[in-house]
Image (cartoon, rainbow, N blue to C red):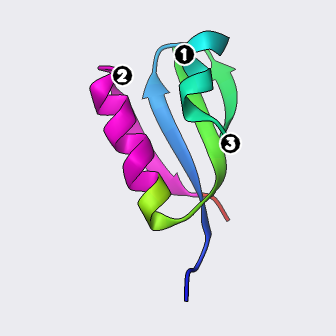
Amino acid sequence: MVVSHGYRIVVKGRLSDRLGSAFGGLTLERRSGETVLRGASERVRLETVLDRLRALNIELVRVDADE
């Protein structure tokens, strides 16, 4: 059984639309000095997003459950 959860992934800086497109399926909310990626996600998907952030050298600020 796969259980879906929502996540808020906060990264340092304001991601452009082009860079944000690397995270298809997640919405981007740009704030002063940071971007929030948000969306329903399975655990494997979250790990994939975090791996992609590392590969793109984007600094992770925090990950929260988004209920």
Contact between marks 3 and 1 (CB within 8 A): the answer is: no
* Residue range (magenta): 46-65
Q: Is residue 56 magenta?
A: yes
SS of the residue under disc 1: helix
Q: Foreground residue, 19 or 32?
A: 19
Distance from Cα at disc 2 to Cα at disc 3: 18 Å
Q: Residues within 10 Å of mark 1 (few under 14, many from 20)?
A: few
Distance from Cα at disc 3 to Cα at disc 1: 13 Å
Q: Residue 25 at x, y = what percent?
A: 68, 42
Question: Hey, which residue is sitting farthest bottom in the picture?
Answer: 1
Residue under the point 64% across and 19% down? 31
Left or right of residue 29: residue 35: left
Left or right of residue 21: residue 45: left
Q: Residues within 10 Å of mark 3 (few under 14, many from 20)?
A: few
**Residue position marked by numbered label 1 in the rendering:** 19
- Quadrant of the image containing the C terminus: bottom right
**Residue position marked by numbered label 2 in the rendering:** 58
Q: Residue 46 at x, y = what percent?
A: 45, 54
Q: Which mark is residue 25?
A: 3
Q: Residue 36 at x, y = what percent?
A: 59, 33
Sequence-wise first label, 3 or 1: 1
Distance from Cα at disc 1 to Cα at disc 2: 10 Å
Give the amino acid type for the residue marked by disc 1 in the picture. Leu
Give the amino acid type for the residue marked by disc 2 in the picture. Ile
